[in-house]
Amino acid sequence: MILESISQKVGNLFSKFGSPTKWIVLSLIFTALASYFIIKEMYLYAFVSFVLVCLFELVDGSVNKLNPTKRSKLGSYLDAISNVYIEGAILFAMLFGSLPDFFFPIRGWIAIYMFGFLTAYYVKAASREKEVIRTEIKGLLERYERWIILGVGLLLAVFDHLYLSYIVVILAILTNLSAFQRIYAAVAYTRNKFTITSKINR
């Protein structure tokens, strides 16, 4: 309820500034800045840039929810694609840093994280494309929750890079669990639907 209230207020405030698509462009610009600062290991600037990315995404979503007629289908499509690029760019930038390893090379954890969040996105899209399930499948960890945790990791890296390594490991595990949860939800829904249809046809 609190988040919905904040989203509505943000939408009311920024809906006066035209098309929500402009916020996508700003998000991508500051994503590039955040990625640059991560590569340079300037984590305070990376954190500030990433916070602005999250803010622009919040504004974009809030304005679109309040005034859906302002966005075309192409705009909604570009928004979904930009979300993948934003998270992917941040993770890709981390590959060039010198984060401490945790049990095995941190680049491996980054790859697992990237694999997990991409799979979660694809499972969601594929379930709709193949008409497995019409309702939205909620995962253990949604995009904004991941980004909040990632932002905390960038902030903690200002004090010690090891903290960001811990965050990457946590997100690598949780994103894959979220993907498996979505897969299980789609399979379970399909089986239940098949069982109910079979009983009706008897």
Image: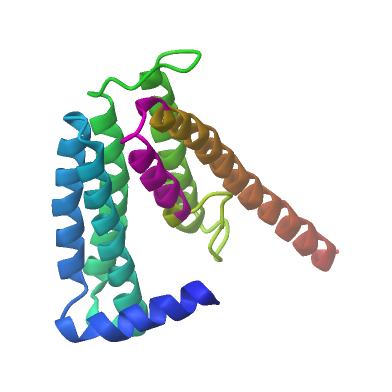
- Residue 130 falls left or right of residue 106: right
Q: Nearer the viewer, residue 168 or 92?
A: 168
Q: Nearer the viewer, residue 193 or 26?
A: 26
Question: Which quadrant of the view contains residue 108?
Answer: top left
- Residue 129 falls left or right of residue 52: right
Task: For residue 67, say whether it is visible.
Answer: no
Quick check: is 143 in the magenta stretch?
A: no
Which residue does the image show at 39% across and 32% down from the upper left? 164
Report x, y in % for residue 143: 43, 53
Q: Nearer the viewer, residue 156 or 54?
A: 156
Marks counted in the figure total: 0
Task: For residue 32, say whether it is visible.
Answer: yes
Which residue does the image show at 31% across and 47% down from the upper left? 84
Using the image, determine if residue 88 lies above or below residue 140: above
Q: Residue furthest top?
A: 104
Quick check: is 160 in the magenta stretch?
A: yes
Which residue does the image show at 50% across and 13% down from the upper left? 103
Using the image, determine if residue 88 lies above or below residue 138: above
Q: Nearer the viewer, residue 72 or 85?
A: 85
Q: How is the image coloured?
A: rainbow
Quadrant assignment for the N terminus: bottom right
Magenta part of the protein: which range? 145-162
Which residue does the image show at 57% across and 60% down from the upper left? 133
Report x, y in % for residue 158: 31, 36
